[in-house]
Amino acid sequence: MGAGKASRPRFGIVPRFTGLAVPVGSVLFAFVAGGLIVLISGANPIDAYQGLLCGVGLLCAGGENPALEISNTIVFVTPLITAGVAVAIPFRAGLFNIGAEGQLLVGTVACLVVGLKLGSLPGILLVPLELIAGMAAGAAWAGIAGVLKATVGAHEVVTTIMLNYVAQYLVQYLIIGGPLQAPGAFSASSPISVNGRLPTFFPASNSLIVLGLPSSVYRVHTGLIIALVAAAVFAFLLWRTSLGYEIRAVGQSQKAARYAGVSVPRTIIVTMLIAGAFAGLAGAIQIAGVDKQLTDKYFNDTTGFDAIAVALLGLGSAVGIVLAAVLFGALHAGGAVMQSDAGLSSNLVLVLQALILFSIAGNFVGQISRLIPGLRPPPTLPSELPPAAPLMTEAAAPPPETA
Amino acid sequence: MSGLGDIGHLLLTANLWQLTLASAVLFLLPALGGVTSERSGVVNIAMEGMMLTGAFFAVVADLKLHNPWLSTLVAMLAGGLMALIHAVVSIRFRADQIVSGIAINIFAAGLTVFLANRIYGVPGVGHVGDSELLPNINIPVLDQIPFLGQVVFQQNVIVYVALIVLVLTQVVLFRTRLGLRIRAVGEHPQAADTAGINVFRLRYGSVLVSGLLSGLAGAYLAIGISNTFVPNITAGRGYIALAAMIFGKWTPYGAFVACLIFGLGFAIFANNSFIHISAYLLNMLPYIITLVVLAGVVGRSTPPAADGLPYVPGSE
Amino acid sequence: MSDTSTLAVDMRGITKQFPGVLANNHVDFSVRHGEIHALVGENGAGKSTLMNELYGLVHPDSGEILVNGKQVHIIGPRDAIALGIGMVHQHFMLIPVFSVGENIMLGREPVTGPDFYDRARARTEIAELTKRYGLALDPDARMGNLPVGLQQRAEIVKVLYRGASILILDEPTGVLTPQESHELFGVLRDLVKSGKTIIFISHKLKEVLDISDRITVMRRGKVVGHLITKDTNEEEIATLMVGREVLLRVDKAPAKPGGVALKVDGLTANSDQGVPALKGVSFELRYGEILGIAGVEGNGQSELTEVLAGIRHATGGHVTLGGRDITTMDANSERDAGVAFIPEDRRGTGLVLSFSIAENSILGRERASLFSWRHVVLRLVAIRDWARRLVKDFDIRTPSIDVAARNLSGGNQQKVIVAREMGSRPKVLLAAQPTRGVDIGAIEFIHRQIVKERDEGAAVLLVSAELDEVRSLSDRIAVMYEGGIVAIVSPDTPEERLGLLMTGGGTRAGAA
């Protein structure tokens, strides 16, 4: 265990090969168990999975265009990457950020407001401003939970969930009869102007035909690049900077971090601010790149919750998160297909997500492989996952007499 | 400003406080479950999911069986089953208990809607007839007391059950041998083990109890207060129950006080037609109250010492 | 030994394999009725595992156990308790928030009514027990508020309450003052007189020679010696424990103290509980000398080193380093100023167990310009070179610098910390319990390194609860008691006098 090749620096962003067994095995477990549930409910699992696989353009039975489905998948994947990072960074510090959804929502609001109020600025200025506004709003939202944790030890699970609800009702208030409601609309805001939008990869033209469909239906946008860059920034931050070192130290041993002169409360707050920024960025990208306006679609958005599974399945590494985001994005797109083709609620995807979480948290892969004789020693759960902490910690607030 | 005046007037009505107690019970039952579970050392944030599952199966059962009592039993069993999953994953598989709890909540959210779709198709879950709901019961004589009589003694049957469970939980945890052992297991499982106590059995039992109570709360919500199931009917009450547990320093009576505060928030929102503040802003009230409550518990609240740590026998 | 009817415990051919380590290797171990039998060995020798098997916390892979002549299968502590075996663990199995009575009664609580805990009956039963064995205790006191010696007493009463006739004590004196140890031994002798049998696990050779009748020595999972106490001595036991000649005293040249490095004046500070722990400490530490702080743990030593290292606030007083006031300096600035700190809790404080050796080698110095560009971006190459050098210079046994610290042995973990702190060429070295729980080979090495630092001119403050270590390493000894320094004496001071000072006696104020 651990006696690897001395030459390869462990400060890497790619999980080692044995590390893949756990995520892959967990997904397999989820599909099998999920299939059983579908079967018990009287439906055909094959229909379900056929619909889901269509998300990656395979086995599309209902006349969907595979290219379009893949495009939809990529659109779903984009915010999941940054939202996944928003959950993964606090994990490293020993914090559970369940509030990515709320942070994302305030990010959408900030981006929208900037886009509407400063709509006359040229795109090259406006878009970055929108994104920065989204990040700032998300950071502030997460910061509330961070400060509460750092000062009174309020567990971030409860505070971030409360903030999720507040953000959700805030959005509802704003666009239903509130200041952002577009005139004549019931539950939608005005759209931001063209120069506030992230450019798409395919021109928004109805006359250009790409892979059988007019190019305007492909909504894949440059936000994807931003998301991938964000993932790379995350990896660099965590493994190549002193701040990342300190965040990881705090997550593994607060006592050792204090010994090293790291202020644990300050690190907690900074971590949550950074995490919120990533989540807010996801929201801003959604508005500037896809929806261009706030609608009631955001009342049921699950990106922030999917991000939890993305972060865990991706084992907290940048590459892992991107891959996991692809999986869940595909499930998202496929879920819609499954619902229309096979008549099965797309909520099945949530069931699969939960099964994946069980499997990773309980290390089912490791435990089951232990039962198979002859198999080489099972992969141990990555030690980077923080141990479960009680719901009220004094840990963040240091003992009164220490520096 | 007139909105605040409206709230002031509201606070003087017995109706509001009656509603407060009724709403508080929805937090109280899962909070008691949480206290039990965490006192034995298992972090349990799955009350939301267990309650949701209970609510769903209560309605399904009632629509089939036309009997609210049996349906409540079904709801409790459903909650218990969810709890069992959490217990097995957390205790036997030593999973991170918070992740497991979140997973239960996501699982419940997805499963209930999925099954609703499978069983009832597009029209959605139907409504339970009035005669098949959990009844409101007025306690004779006591309900005639001015103000208090309406608030306390004209409630749904489950409210009375919940109050009894409240007292039971407090007594069992702090005066009986069983409660002593549960708390020992939550403080220092190694010590309990070496004293010959079965740590695993007590933990499984405590988590199961939290599932039964949350399921009961779900039944009360679905076929006591309302008469149908809608997705996310629990609206985060299970999470708020956690805050109540923390505020109450992991004691039943303490949690009850917090539940009353949260109940008040919900009661005010339910009366939003009388208050001239946007319904959506009022909606935020319970959650903001929770945040304030948590902020006020300035590091004085400590959980059981071994809360959240999987027990590995023979380890130091 | 062959007459089984006089054997209280007879373990034969016990073997136990844990992942990666053979804890017990065909161990034969027997204890006669009414004797005090010492089980001796280094950390990791397998003695705790052996006793855990006797108590049912661990199951042997093979072998048999006989208690009072009958073969038994001990599946859990319940079985052991039923057989009359009781264990007092090294780390107490006590619940701080419960009362003494609740702790003692746990598992055999008296009940009344449907299931109500009968507190009154508990009180009377405990009073009876404590009277019978002469171990006074207040059943309603909160366990967490009791001093360590009384907590241990509660552990013993707990064991006796369950009718134990065979008592296993695992490293009982680690947390006791010499006075309390003395009292404990008196209690043990009384227990033997009333017919109990005692198994005494320890690595403290002097005590073992003092209290036991016979000794079994284990090394690396095997029994390597059966000794009769009155016929043996420290050197023989130590040699068996380690397998070679062991230097029990450190060879060192006399000190050449230079100028004053640290001047501590009236230092006060509080403990984690907010209670005053340092009540006016004053001393001088010179370059080129080792000042040892002797004292039982809990008298302020931990707080002293933490304040000096910048991890704890001082509430009053001054500390100057080379004339500069560093009283309120934080840990990072202290490191920059040349103060290194080996903390007493290596696994919790001194290392991040899941980090690699390389990552641990810069703990506390991650923002130093040597290790990070503009204090932000880590210089991976420089860090790895540094780690490799430390591994070489300090003989850390590891296949690579990427091994996680948790996979190292205790001794090697400590060496990583020692290497990191000494490798920074400090002016002042604060070493708290530097060899606790470390095997003898590594102890020798670390002692030599500490002396080397002193010889190269560093000022060394050594805090240790092991009196032998303090006496053999220090050039001067300061005895701490209840938050203050009661005396500064020479290391040749006899042990009895030191023990007396450590418990607050022997000074003009302490004498009646």
Image: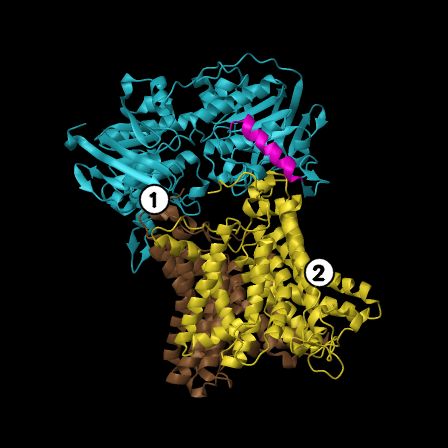
Chain colours: A yellow, B brown, C cyan
Q: Quadrant of the N terminus of chain C?
A: top left
Label 2, residues with CA under 10 Å away: few <14, some 14-19, many ≥20: many
Q: Residue C441, located in which quarter of the rendered image?
A: top left
Mark linked to residue A135: 2
On screen, residue A104 versus residue A337, left or right, reads right
In the image, residue A161 lies at what x, y percent? 58, 64
Q: Which residues are magenta?
A: C379-395
In the image, residue A335 lies at what x, y percent? 54, 74
* Residue C388 is inside the magenta segment: yes
In the image, residue C250 lies at what x, y percent? 48, 17
Judging depth in this view, the residue of C395 and B254 nearest the camera is C395
From this view, report whether residue C169 is shown above or below residue C95.
above
Badge 2 element: helix
Q: Chain of mark 1?
A: C
What distance separates the C-alpha of mark 2 from that of mark 1? 57 Å
Judging depth in this view, the residue of A286 and A73 nearest the camera is A73
Which secondary structure dominates the residues rendered in magenta?
A: helix
* Residue C185 is inside the magenta segment: no
The residue labelled by disc 1 is C104
